[in-house]
Amino acid sequence: MNPIFEGRLQEVAQHYQSGDHHLGLRRILDAALETRDMTIFEKTLAFCRQTEDRNDDSVVQPALDLIASISSAGVHIAETKRKNVVSVKGISKQYRGGKFKLFPVSLELAPGEIIGLVGENGNGKTTLLRIMAGELHPDTGEITYGFSAPVSNNYEKRSQLAFVQQRIPRWWGTLTDNLHFAARHYGLIGRENELWVEMIIARLGLRSFRMHSWNSLSSGYRTRFELARTLLRSPKILLLDEPLANLDIIAQQTILHDLRFLAQSQSQPMAIVLSSQQIYEVEKISDRIVFLKQGEPIYQDLRSTVSTGSAVNLFEIETTATRDELLAAFQSLSVQQIQFNGGVFIATFQGDVTASAVMNNLATQKFEVSYFRNISQSSRRFFANA
Amino acid sequence: MIKKINKFLLLYFPLIWNTRALWMLLSLAGLHLAFYLSGWWYFDTYLKIQGYPESTSIMGGSNIAYAAIISILLIIVWLVFYLRNNPFKSFYPLPRGYFAIEFAIIFLVLTGCINLPRSFAKGFYDHVEHQSHGVNLTEEINTVNLAYALIPQNQFDYDAYNRCDSLEYRETRAYIDSIARVDSLDRIRLQAYRDSVGNDEADLAEERTQRKKDLEHHDYSYLNFCKQYTGDYDTSAMGRRAISAKLQLMLTSNNKAEVAAILNRFEHMCLKYKIDYNVNIPSYTAMAFKDDRHRPSVYLNISEERRTLDFESLNRVLSHIHQARTRAFDGTEWLITLYMALFMALALFSFRLSSTRIWLISLVGAGVISVIYGIVVALVRGEYFALGGAITLIVLFYLIYQISLRARRKTMAGVNLVWFTWAFPGLPMLIHVLISELSRPKNIYNPKTLAYVMATPSALYTFLEDHQSALDTFYFVFILLVVTTVLYRHYRTWQAMDEE
C-alpha cells in the first residue's frame, strides 16, 4: 500500500461522491495510468465507454468499483533517486546579426519539478527552451541531462527530450494512428500500444476526436494531441513553449492542473519547463519561476517559505475610481505610487501594508472594484515598471 | 480487412505501415501481372512480331510510354502517403537496421516501377514461345535459307564473285583490313593473326588476280549462290557452304522433287507466319531447272511485275521465336536498370532524411554549378579544354567554400551531405575509369609497318577490362552497403545538429 497513492484514490472517490464527475474521471485516469497494469487499463476504458454520456449519480458506483480495482493493483513506483534530470549552467546566446542577447542562465530540475519561464515577447523564453532542447547552440555554458540510460549521440539525446513547440508541426492521417505510430517507436507493441493510446486519449479529453485529422482540429486540440504524443514518449524532461497560447481559459486551467499532476506522477515523474505569458496561471503550478527581462534572468523560488523581506507590497486594482480618488483613499496607508497601464492600477505600499487593509479602504470609499490581486510575491511585479 | 491489416502493421511494423510498402509492393505485383498479361495478349498473331526489328523494341515504344505514365502516377500516389509522417524528423528512437529496410523498400518500389516493360516483354515472349512450341526452328531456318536461294532476290547473289570460295577469300582480306580500325586490346590479337597470314603486299596482289579471274568468269547461276540469309544465331542450322552444297547437289542431280518440297514447306511457313507475298512460290521449282546452267531468270527486287515476298518479316519472326526460346538472364541490362533505380532511390532517400529546403538548395546549387561548368567548358575548347575545366571546378569549389563560411553550419552541412549522396554512386565508377585510363597501354609507332601498335597491356588494365561487369556489380553492392550502414549515420548526426 502506498499512502500517497491511496490518498489520491480517496480524493477521486470524494470527487465522484460530491458530483465532480469530470474532475473525477481525469483523476481516475491518472490513477489508472499510475498502475501501468493492462487489466486496469481495459477496465478503465470500459468504464469510460460506459459512463461517456452520463453525468448523474449512476456513475458513482462503477467509479468506486474501479477505484477499488486500481487500489488492489497498486501503483508502479518509479526509481526513487531524486537526481537532477537537467542541469543548466551559465548558458547564454546571442544571434548572429541580432541585437538580442540571452544573458547567462542557470537552473536545475529534478523529476516532479516545474519551472515556469515568464517574460514579455522577445525576451528569450523560446531561445532558452530551444537551447535546452538541443535546437540551438549556446555561446557559453553547458547543459547536463540526467537520462536513465547513457546516450551515445545527439539524436538519441533529442529522442529522450520532449519539446512541444508553440507552433505544432503538422501531421497527416488520423489522430489515433499518429499516436499509435509514436507509441510503437517508443516500445509499445500490439495490445499494449492500443491500450496506452486509448488511455492517453481519454486522459486528455480527445475521445471525440480520435478519428479526426489535423485540419479538423482546433489549435487547442492540436496542443492536446501534442501533449498526448509527448506523454506516450514517457519523457523525463518536458519542455513546453507557450502551451497555453492556443487554449481557452478553462482548457488552460485544466492543462496546467494536469501538468502539475503529471509531473508528480509516482510511476513516471517528469521535470517540466514551460514558458508562458499567463503569469498567474503558471505561478499556480510552478515550483520556481525564471523571469526573463530583456534576456536577463530573475529567479524566484515559489516553494520557499522564507519571506522575501520585500520592502514594498504591490496590488493590482481594477476599478471605476480615478487615480486621484485612489490616492486620496490610500493616503492613510501611505501609498508610495499608483501606476495605471490603461486597464488596471498598480498601487505600491510599504511592506507592512496588508491586502485586507487596502481592500478595507476601497470598501470604505465604496469604489466599484471588479478585480483585486496581491502581486507582491508574483513575477507580475517585475512588469510593474514596464 | 484492409483496415485490420493496416492496424496490425501500425501496431507491430510501423515502418511497413508508414512507407505503405505492403500496398505498394502488392500494387506493383498486380501491375507487373497486368503488364505480363498485356504482353501475352498483345501477341495474338505472328504479325505482331514482324514489326519489331530488334527484340528490345518489344520493351520500347508505346509499351515504355504506358509504363512510364503508370509508374509516375503510382510513384506520385505513393509519395503522397509515404512522405507524410517521418519518425526520423520527429526524433523517434529508430531501431538498428531501420534505415537499411527503409532504403530497401524505396529501392524495391522504384526497381519495380522502372521494370514494368520487362514484364510486358516477358508476357509477349512467353506467348511466342507457347505458340511456337511445335516449331522445329532449325528446319525452318534451313527451309527459308534454301527458299531464299531458289527465289532469287538480287542478281548479285548469283554471281561467281559471290560463290563461297571467293567470299571467304575476300572476307579474310576484309578481316585483315579491319585491324587498322581497331583501337583496343584486340589489336594485339589481330596483329598476331595478320602476321600469320603473311605479307600484305603478297595478299593484295593475289586478291587482284582473283578478282580479275572472277570477273572474267562472270556467270550468274544458282550454283554460285552462297548465302545464309537468316538463322546465324542457330549453330545447328546449315551454314552458307552447306546451303550452297545442298543447292548444287539438288540442281546437278536434277532433284526437282526435293526442290518442290522445300518450296512447299516454305509456302506453308509463309501462310503460317502471315507473310505478305504475291508470287507463285511452287513455280520457282521449274525456274531453277529452266536451263542446264541453272541461271535465274526472274529477280524479285528488279522485277517490273511488282512481285513481293517479305523475307525480312519472316527473318524477324524466326529471330523472335529463337529469342523467345533462348532468353537468358542479361546481367548488364539488369545492372543498368538497378543503377537507375539506385540513383532515383538515393535522390528520394536524401529528400527523406534531409529537409525540403536543404534538398532544394542542393538541387539548385548542383544545377547552377553544372550550368556554369558546362558554359565554361563549351567556351574553352582545344588544348585548353582540360585546363579550363579544372580551373572552373577549382573556382566553383572555392566559391562554395566561401559561401559555406557565411551560411549556417547546419545548412551547409546538409547541402554537402545531399550532394555527396547524389554523387556517391558515381564515385566507384569514376575511380574505375580513371585507373583504367591511367593504366591503358600506350600506342607505339612501328616505323617498319608505318602503324601504331598497342603495347602489351598491364595486368591491372586487363583485369579491369575483362571484369567490367563483375566490378560494376561489386560497386553496386558496395554502394548499397555504404548507404545502409554508414551514410544514414551522417544524416542522423546532421538531423540532431543544433541550428546556430
Image: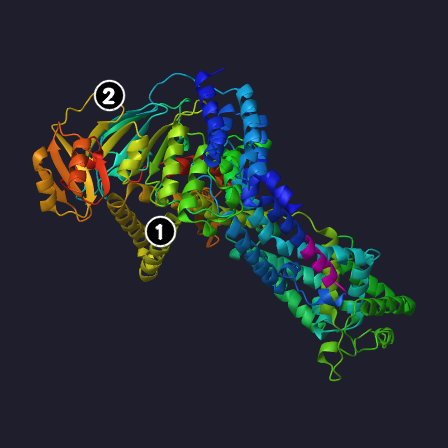
Q: Amino acid at mark 1?
A: Ile
Query: Is residue A294 something one can see in this rendering?
Result: no
User: To which quarter of the image does residue B494 belong?
Assistant: top left
Q: Amino acid at mark 2?
A: Thr
* Residues in magenta, as a range: B33-44
Tell me the mark number nearer the camera, choosing from 2 and 1. Answer: 2
Magenta highlight on residue B324: no
Placement of the C terminus of chain B among the 4 image quadrants:
top left
Percent x, y of residue A294: 17, 39
Residue identifier under label 1:
B361
| Residue farthest along the top direction in this orientation | A1
Mark 1 nearby-residue class (10 Å; few <14, some 14–19, many ≥20): some
Mark 2 nearby-residue class (10 Å; few <14, some 14–19, many ≥20): few
Along the viewing direction, whichever of A200 and B163 lies nearer the viewer: A200
Callout 1: chain: B
Mark sitting on residue A305: 2
Q: Residue at x 77, y 68 (%)?
A: B148
Percent x, y of residue B276: 77, 74
Percent x, y of residue B371: 35, 58
